Amino acid sequence: MHAWEIIASGRVQNVGFRRYAYDCAHECRITGYVRNLRDGTVQIIASGDPERFLQFCAMLRSANRYILVQSLDICELNSTVIYNDFEIR
């Protein structure tokens, strides 16, 4: 199982982005969590199949008109924590 950290920047807070990421994760069968950071970005820890992860990232980039994802900074993690589900924190 692979795991990644994603930092999403742009208009990603107070526009429903965490809920959108949650829905995308469930559709792509990605586990982990999503949370707002104090600097206005959103952190996502995602675990799953690499092909499904690519689909998940593509979905995040093509969000609705209220959400504007300017960038996704993606870093593969060396250690994997097993998550049972995807949650909003």
Image (cartoon, rainbow, N blue to C red):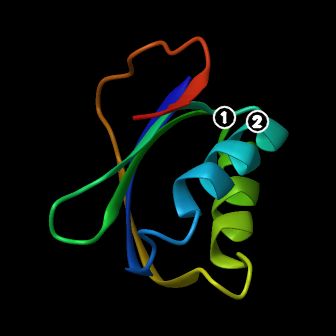
Within 10 Å of disc 1 (Cα), the crowding (few <14, some 14-19, many 20+) is many
**Camera-side residue of 21 and 30:** 21
In the rendered image of this protein, does residue 65 appear above or below residue 12? below
Question: Residue 12: x percent and y percent?
Answer: 45, 73
In the rendered image of this protein, does residue 16 appear above or below residue 86? below
Q: Tell me: 4 left or right of 68.
A: left
Q: Tell me the quarter of the image containing the N terminus.
A: top right
Label 1 SS: loop
Q: Which mark is residue 48?
A: none
What is the three-letter code of the residue carrying label 1? Ile
In the rendered image of this protein, does residue 65 appear above or below residue 38? below
In the rendered image of this protein, does residue 79 appear above or below residue 70? above
Q: Residue at x 74, y 46 (%)?
A: 23
Q: Which mark is residue 26?
A: 2
Q: Tell me: 38 left or right of 40.
A: left
The residue that disc 1 covers is 30
Question: Residue 22: x percent and y percent?
Answer: 64, 43
Q: Residue at x 76, y 36 (%)?
A: 26
Q: Residue at x 54, y 72 (%)?
A: 15
Label 2 SS: helix
Within 10 Å of disc 2 (Cα), the crowding (few <14, some 14-19, many 20+) is some
Of circles 1 and 2, which is in front?
2
Mark 1 touching mark 2, by CB under 8 A?
A: yes
